[in-house]
Amino acid sequence: MVDFSAYALDKRVAVVTGAGSGIGRATARLLADAGARVVCADVDGAAAERTAAEIDGVPAHVDVARREQVVDLIQGTADRHGRLDILCNIAGIIRTGLVVDVPEEDLDAVWAVNFKGTFHACQTAARIMCAQGSGAIVNTASGAVDSATPEIMSYSVSKAAVVQLTKNLAAEVGRYGVRVNAVAPGLVRTAMTSRHYLLPDGSIDEAARAAAEKPLKRMSPLGMIGEPEDIAHAVHYLVSDAARFVTGQILRPNGGVAMPW
Ligand code: NAD
């Protein structure tokens, strides 16, 4: 008989940021299915409440770009539940524009959410987890760190910094029983990547999306674009005891795409 007990998260206390949509929502659902008590944090408070209601979790209206809100989220969760076992930093934003055109405000906005939001959550959680003697953190990078995809420099820079943060923190906290890893997803169908194909009635122009996805599908040995659950399964693995020997790693659920540029 196969023993899946290493994947169980019974009674573990987890915080998932960006839980209101896409990869964060799928992750919150999967961790809850595995038995975790999940705090669903999002800057969109109504979306956080929707996800929390689906999984009997705890909603949290939090802007990860605000240091004090992040500290309250993480420290407050540990105080209320007596421990913090899992942190998944999934909240993220993107701005597009050529390097020569990028306004400083866009650079700052992306950096504040994607890097500093992840950093402040990691710093607060690592202090708690090290004192506790256990814990698992998963950050969200992107396939963008393996390429020079045009017009998303501010995003790629923030995600490259998340990769470095992940490696540095893993090296520092491993001796306290705390693991830190990241996922670097390829293209996944979520609100972030579907907004270009939004029709006035709020539905998706599937023909336009399929045309845009075609060249990427050709680059993938699997010939597919990801769904949020494909990334959530990777995150679940990394936070579970099945990955007890894994830290400082960047897992790339991306259909095998190797960016050509
Ligand atoms: P999404 O837009 O569906 O979800 C992102 C969530 O983060 C939203 O619910 C949003 O409200 C929340 N959020 C944004 N800013 C926030 C803030 N300041 N504080 C708290 N919450 C905030 O996008 P997604 O595709 O699910 O993206 C999730 C993560 O995966 C992001 O970090 C993204 O960069 C990364 N990623 C996505 C893809 C992809 O193809 N979709 C690929 C690689 C990496």
Image (cartoon, helix red, strand yellow):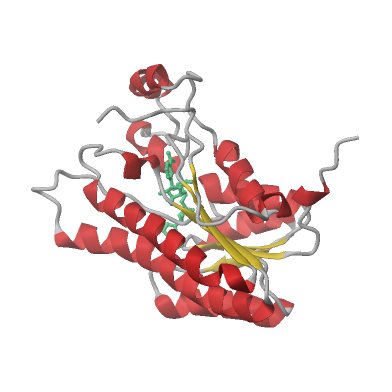
Query: Along the horizontal axis of the image, is 212 left or right of 229?
Result: left
Residue 188 appears left or right of 232 = left
Image location (x, y in percent) of residue 2: 86, 36
Q: Is residue 108 visible?
A: yes
Is residue 16 among the parts visible in the rendering? no
Q: Which quadrant would residue 138 be assigned to in this image?
A: bottom right
Q: Say if 243 sits above or below 64 in the image.
A: above
Residue closer to the observer: 23 or 259: 259
| Residue 246, x across and y down, in percent | 60, 53
**132 is higher (above) or lower (below) than 88:** below
* 212 over 240 or under it: above or below: above
The single residue placed furthest to the right in the displayed view is 1
Q: Residue at x 67, y 67 (%)?
A: 85
Residue 231 percent coordinates (x, y): 55, 41
Work out which quarter of the rendered image holds the C terminus and state it: top left
Which residue is drawn at the image coordinates 33% and 34% (left, top)? 196
Q: How many marks on residues?
A: 0
**Rendered-image quadrant of the N terminus:** top right
What residue sits 62% from the left and 51% below the top?
Answer: 238
Could you tell me residue 6's position as x and y percent? 78, 50
Residue most extreme to the left: 100
Can you say whether 42 is above or below 198 in the image?
A: below
Q: Name the residue located 33 percent from the left edge and 66 percent from the top edge.
A: 112
Question: For this rendering, which residue is in front, 79 or 160?
Answer: 160
